[in-house]
Image: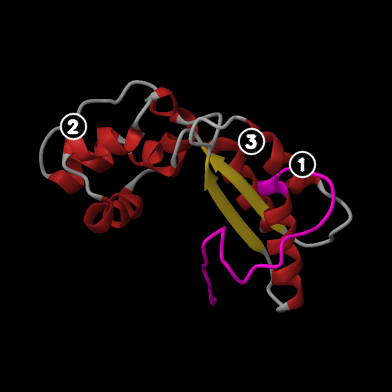
């Protein structure tokens, strides 16, 4: 399986023109681009970053029937960094020291700072944590962002 990745705000992306917010239009633009390039599916993930409208925009794009293309769109609440904090067993294993359960990761106001306080820097340990975290733990601890995204990814297998 070959996977390509790009920033959501890639400068070469042809953004969909029509009604809807910016992330809705970008999502549709990515679907059209992926379809045109012959991809099998699109997985797109953004951070909410305290902009609650982003969730609605990606939900609308996920349900947009005018573009027939397999996709799993998701919004990490508040950011992908909160998902890193969801599995204290994975953190304990990677950091080599006990890490207490983080209270409701999706409600942590500044998850990037919380990760840094634990000694987790994006450039070095995020990948390692993601390799060992338990998906079911993440689904349970992050029900507003990760759980729906994970279900959409599972639905791609059908």
The image shows residue 144 at horizontal and vertical percentages of 56, 29
Query: Which residue appears at 74% of the width and 47% of the height?
Result: 62
Q: Is 122 positioned to the left or the right of 149 in the image? A: left
Query: Pointer 2 and pointer 3: residues touching (CB < 8 Å)?
Result: no
* Residue at mark 1: 60
Q: Earlier in the sequence, mark 2 or mark 3?
A: 3
Secondary structure, mark 1, is helix
In the picture, measured across the screen, residue 117 lies left or right of residue 2, that is left
Coloration of the structure image = secondary structure
Q: Say which residue appears at 76% left-offset and 76% top-offset.
A: 36
Q: Quadrant of the C terminus?
A: bottom right
Q: Is residue 39 above or below residue 129?
A: below
Residue 31: quadrant of the picture: bottom right
Q: Quadrant of residue 102?
A: top left
Residue contact between numbered discs 3 and 1, judged by CB atoms under 8 Å = no
Give the spatial CA distance, label 2 vs label 1.
38 Å
Q: Which mark is residue 143?
A: none
Q: CA distance from mark 2 to mark 3?
A: 30 Å
Query: For this rendering, which residue is in front, 12 or 31?
Result: 12
Mark 3 burial class by Cα count in 10 Å: few <14, some 14-19, many 20+: many
Task: Identify residue for label 3.
Answer: 55
Q: Looking at the image, is mark 3 or mark 1 earlier in the sequence?
A: 3
Residue 69 image point, x, y percent: 78, 62
> Which residue has dot 2 on it?
99
Residue positioned 73% across, 52% down in the render: 25
| Label 2 secondary element | loop
Secondary structure at numbered mark 3: helix
Q: Residue furthest right?
A: 66
In the rendered structure, which segment of residues is drawn in magenta? 1-24
């Amino acid at each position: 399986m070959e996977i390509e990745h790009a920033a959501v705000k890639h400068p070469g992306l042809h953004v969909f023109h029509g009604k809807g917010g910016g992330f809705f239009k970008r999502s549709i633009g990515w679907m059209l681009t992926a379809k045109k390039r012959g991809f099998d599916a699109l997985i797109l993930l953004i951070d909410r970053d305290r902009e609650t409208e982003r969730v609605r925009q990606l939900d609308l794009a996920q349900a947009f029937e005018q573009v027939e293309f397999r996709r799993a769109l998701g919004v990490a609440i508040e950011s992908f960094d909160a998902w890193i904090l969801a599995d204290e067993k994975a953190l304990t294993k990677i950091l080599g020291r006990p890490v207490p359960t983080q209270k409701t990761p999706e409600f942590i106001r500044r998850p990037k700072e919380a990760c840094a306080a634990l000694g987790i820097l994006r450039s070095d340990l995020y990948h390692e944590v993601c390799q060992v975290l338990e998906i079911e733990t993440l689904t349970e601890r992050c029900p507003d962002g990760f759980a729906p995204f994970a279900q959409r990814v599972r639905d791609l297998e059908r």
